[in-house]
Amino acid sequence: MDLRFTEKEEAFRAECRAWLEANVPKEPLPSGDTAEGFALHVEWEKKLFEARWAVVSWPEEYGGRGASLFEWLIFEEEYYRAGAPNRVTQNGIFLLAPTIFEFGTEEQKKRILRPMAAAEHLWAQGWSEPNAGSDLASLKSTARRVEGGWRLTGQKTWCTRGAFCDSAFGLFRTDPTQERHKGLTYFLFPLKGEGVTVRGVDRLDGDLGFAEVFLEDVFVPDRDVLGEVNKGWEVAMATTSSERGLSLRSPGRFMATASRLVDLYKRYRETCDPALRKEVIDAYAAAEAYRWYTFGTVTRMSQGGEIGADSSMNKVYWSEMDVRTHEAALAMIGDRLELDEGSPAAEDHASWLKGFQFALAGPIYAGTNEIQRNIIAERVLGLPRK
Amino acid sequence: MDLRFTEKEEAFRAECRAWLEANVPKEPLPSGDTAEGFALHVEWEKKLFEARWAVVSWPEEYGGRGASLFEWLIFEEEYYRAGAPNRVTQNGIFLLAPTIFEFGTEEQKKRILRPMAAAEHLWAQGWSEPNAGSDLASLKSTARRVEGGWRLTGQKTWCTRGAFCDSAFGLFRTDPTQERHKGLTYFLFPLKGEGVTVRGVDRLDGDLGFAEVFLEDVFVPDRDVLGEVNKGWEVAMATTSSERGLSLRSPGRFMATASRLVDLYKRYRETCDPALRKEVIDAYAAAEAYRWYTFGTVTRMSQGGEIGADSSMNKVYWSEMDVRTHEAALAMIGDRLELDEGSPAAEDHASWLKGFQFALAGPIYAGTNEIQRNIIAERVLGLPRK
Amino acid sequence: MRFGFTEDQLMLRDTVREILARECTPEVVRAVWEKKSPKTPYGTLAEAGVLGMTLTEEQGGLGLDETDAALPLEEAGYAALPEPIVEAIAALPVVAAHGGGAWAEKIAAGEARLSISIGDARLVAFAEQADVFLRYDGKKLYLAPREEVALEMQVSVDRTRSIAVPRFTDEGATVLAEGAEAAELAALVFDRAALGSALFLNGLSRKMLELAVEYAKDRVQFGRPIGSQQAVKHRLADALIALEFAKPLAYRAAWSVAVADPERSLHVSLAKLRASEAARFVAKQSLQVHGAIGYTIEHDLHLWMKRAWALAAAYGTEDFHRDRIGRAILNEA
Amino acid sequence: MRFGFTEDQLMLRDTVREILARECTPEVVRAVWEKKSPKTPYGTLAEAGVLGMTLTEEQGGLGLDETDAALPLEEAGYAALPEPIVEAIAALPVVAAHGGGAWAEKIAAGEARLSISIGDARLVAFAEQADVFLRYDGKKLYLAPREEVALEMQVSVDRTRSIAVPRFTDEGATVLAEGAEAAELAALVFDRAALGSALFLNGLSRKMLELAVEYAKDRVQFGRPIGSQQAVKHRLADALIALEFAKPLAYRAAWSVAVADPERSLHVSLAKLRASEAARFVAKQSLQVHGAIGYTIEHDLHLWMKRAWALAAAYGTEDFHRDRIGRAILNEA
């Protein structure tokens, strides 16, 4: 056990911090889940990519730095510490890219990864359907074999930022004789063009964070099949594990939130309920626990270990921690908690309200926490399914 | 709505309070779940009965005062407020007696009720079997028809204070061709005599609170069948509803606990964690909510309403409140919480440790809280069973 | 001792329930949200005497008290009524009895709306709709007509709540009371508004729970309704328990206010604390059961949920009421 | 950066695990509970060098540090070892380095037992077994032989913990340090004991969870194992999460102590707070899953559960450690 960072890692941190200090917008950008905010976020992503901070852990040929997982964690700590904008590329770089690295052809890698990282081509996820949420395997969208490719038909929903993106990825039933997890194929498909209708859906906080996507006989060439035909479930599972686990929710994010909560408390400690001190300390302790848990996971992964069902524990933990942390903040803000963005009297507090609403999605998306707890109980603890 | 007590009720309260002040032992009795403590408790019960405070809501002919449900609540408030001893008769008077009042013959009422209330004949419950806990209907003990009565064979467990009592009540399978809820009969059976073996089992807190009862061809006369033969399940359900609901857990008990917690806090507020103030206030608010919920239930019952599935809400609520309240107390006591009875340095704190351990049983007995939540969801909210 | 409602009270509840079911549908609430100025049942409620119910008959009211108002306010919450009914019922008796009769009449008739600003509360609700503000500035209690109040408009998370930071002047004020009397009356109005909010919150909770139960019965995943999953069942059972144990405290507080119980403020704080906690809890459970669909503003849930968040902090946050209980029961200064 | 254990450390863990599996069965723990003075593995652990592992080789130890001791202490908790291993590992390096070499040798050899009393701690553990007490009275740090300490024996809820209120005199004391040095050493020993307790608690949690999982697989009600019920699954999943997120904080604190990190005390407090919370939580979940059988002293669960309650409050209660974290991170006085 050696918890010191290496000289190389410290240098990486210093370089990263210096760049972020010089480049992070002084004023927070408008939400990346609105049309005008999205454009500004894309601009920021391009800048990040140019400086090679967009995908530090990717190989250099795709715009990365070949950074280690620990360096990636350092980058994330610095990124959130600096209060840098949310990543509108994240569905691509965190959810799709790991699958492409694992299952993609060389052609796919070359064609897709760099524009994705450079925010030139933007990706949305297309996992859910109206009747296939937690129960992803009940999806109904189909892909029909045609000359040179496939025709996709069906409806996808909860496509994050789908109204603003260029393409999406998801599963379609390619073998209609098979049921549930079988006979599915992983497709990359366009969000613009013939047969595609995208309808934005306002999220709880009022931002156009979601989209419904209707596909009618949309042509997709063979080169946009990811992995084997009819093996889509296996291919997708690699990605959902990333979604729940390490990559999407780095400790840096929650440490930054805990640290903001500490600052908020320092402003209000004279007037707020004394019991909130406990909440603040507990939030800090929870974030620290998450940080060290993740360092343990990364150590194991660096030695060739798999993340596996740990990702379910991870997901339940961070999502519920995030709600509690924001609840503590709202309690501190008191009767001003209802002041939304655009309120002159909101000071910086509206970001907590926004963050709270965002946090409430955590226990729902990427597989509800109910599903995650089933997975933990059955796969980690070995309790019987039935 | 009129939340004033009537003059008659106030007079009842005054009489009750005066008697308790004069008669409640100055020093707490040793636990009623130990042999020597039990004897002292029985002595106390006899005194209570002589003064006609043992079963205030029963008709006068059985030793009661024909008191209303509201008067009963008043009695309970005063009883706990006075710190009077736990009722070792409670399995009889709260669990069995309501069933006898509803299903018993005149002969049974005359023979059983008064000695039960007078603590001359002591009753234990015999619901569970080793493989029939939450799943009561899977019980295996049998009763075989013989001349003038029945022969009982089987094993009952978790019989509260069974090691000290004279008789017990429980279900036995009288029709071996029937399964689960059918073909059961409600019997009163002896805990002493031929074929009966009683083995005391130490409870979590070290007291001999439980017993296992082994029955081998034990004769029970026909007059000790309660209700119809083969209708035992229906008869028993009336009793389990009492166990979970109103009668066993009167608000007076929890208000007294909350009030003791307030007193404890007053002693420690200068030194304990300031966040405990919140716990104390919440404990008080929770007890008040329970009190008024119960007054609502009693009002409905006084007007001919049924308690029904409400009793499940009641049980989940008080049992979890009781744990939380004791946890707050232990946090206040700090590192002395481990001091058990018999510790010179324990002051009065060991009673909180004892109470905490007792509270932990709440979410388990009388139907686990898991079962209760199923009942609430299915019978009150109408969610589907499967 | 009798802790239940009379036939008359239940009938009044049913009347209000019917009016709201007809005129305060989710579509109406949503239209207010979207600033489309739909017709709300404010006028109908006034006609039925509901807004002025706590005025005496001489004042043009129904001569009813807080126990009578309890169930109608709960119904208002159930329908997420986007109108200042809590404020009308809380303030009118004080307004009418202390020289504000003209305003009281107009409000009871549904021709004007009243908003409340007591002490150092930072925000006023119904800022755009209000014609008059009942203001207590620490010295006097007065009615300030809309045009004399400077309002810095804010955006509430609940768009049906028009909120503002107000700045009051004395211009055109109708002074109702001064000194100790003003303080006492302001405290009474505050308690009545907190009580009304508690009842309203319990109504919101009931609706949020109902939405979740219906959804859980209908939504099929893994080949069966999600409501047959034990985790969903237990979540909703806990939500029901939270609500059912909050309600009696609100009814009891209503009685304490009605009879001027010396512990009125303690009882109101217990009611508001538990109602707020329950509403936030039920909202969270309901959202989790709905999943992504509940996380959109196309679905109705958020109309109730955001009102719950806002009201849980209005007329005293949970911490405020908890502190007030603490000072009452812990022999604190 | 590497946050994992070495092969050597895992081997040492396995050695300790094997010794304990053989010599510290639940029957042995129960026999201690029942005051039957069974043979415990204290001597075997000493022979394996475990008790003196943190002494240097010149002092007769293994020259290992807290990261090496982490997994063995967790194993000790898993077996509910009723011996002062936390105390030996926490205290011996300080004792040996400051003139207590003779005692250190005896303890490392398993021929004596040490108990710790720092500052205003009210209770000492292993009161009956201890041959010597490491005492810090606010001025000096010294070793007090058993015969010079007046012990008012108490009864712990965990009968394997012999506890007492001690009264120390200076008679026969071996003074290890005075003044600032004593304060610093006492703080170090306290942190090491708190760290050891955190690790021990995590071991207790692991065992309590394992008992519950096994029971849930075996126990059939309603025609299927109770572990197939979602409510039971989720309860145990939550218990696992509590434990798995407590463990890394304890390992990190071990490293901080080993390298004398300036934030050592903060890290120890984080570890102890979360381990105590997790242990109390896991205990509660395990008991609930066991139902009535877990509520008897015939079943093993209580042997672990009561140790967890006691240790969660020893060497700093949760509130103590939470406060210490607060003072470190909130810029408080």
Image (tube, coloured by chain):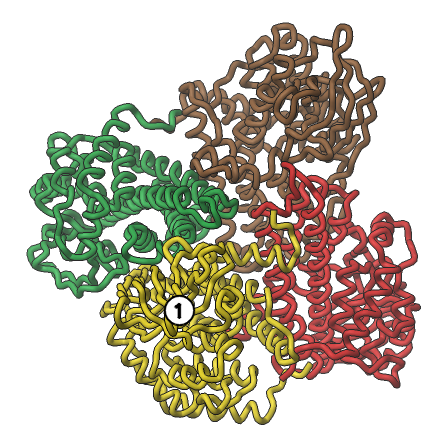
Chain colours: A yellow, B brown, C green, D red
- Image position of D127 with respect to B14: above or below: below
- Image position of C283 with respect to B228: above or below: below
Which of the two residues, B172 or B77, is positioned nearer the viewer here?
A: B172
Q: In this view of the protein, can residue C51 be seen by the observer? A: yes
The percent position of residue B108, horizontal first and vertical second, equals: 65, 9
User: Which residue is label 1 attached to?
Assistant: A125
Residue B23's image quarter? top right
The disc numbered 1 marks a residue on which chain? A
Q: Is residue A38 left or right of residue D63?
A: left
The percent position of residue B288, horizontal first and vertical second, equals: 46, 39
Residue B209's image quarter? top right
Q: Quadrant of the N terminus of chain D?
A: bottom right
User: Badge 1 local density, few (<14 within 10 Å), some, or many (20+)?
Assistant: many
Residue drawn at x 51%, y 49% as measured from the top left: B280
Residue type at mark 1 is Gln
Q: Is residue D4 left or right of residue A213?
A: right
The percent position of residue D320, horizontal first and vertical second, equals: 61, 64
Which of the two residues, A271 or D80, is positioned nearer the viewer here?
A: D80
- Image position of A294 with respect to B376: above or below: below
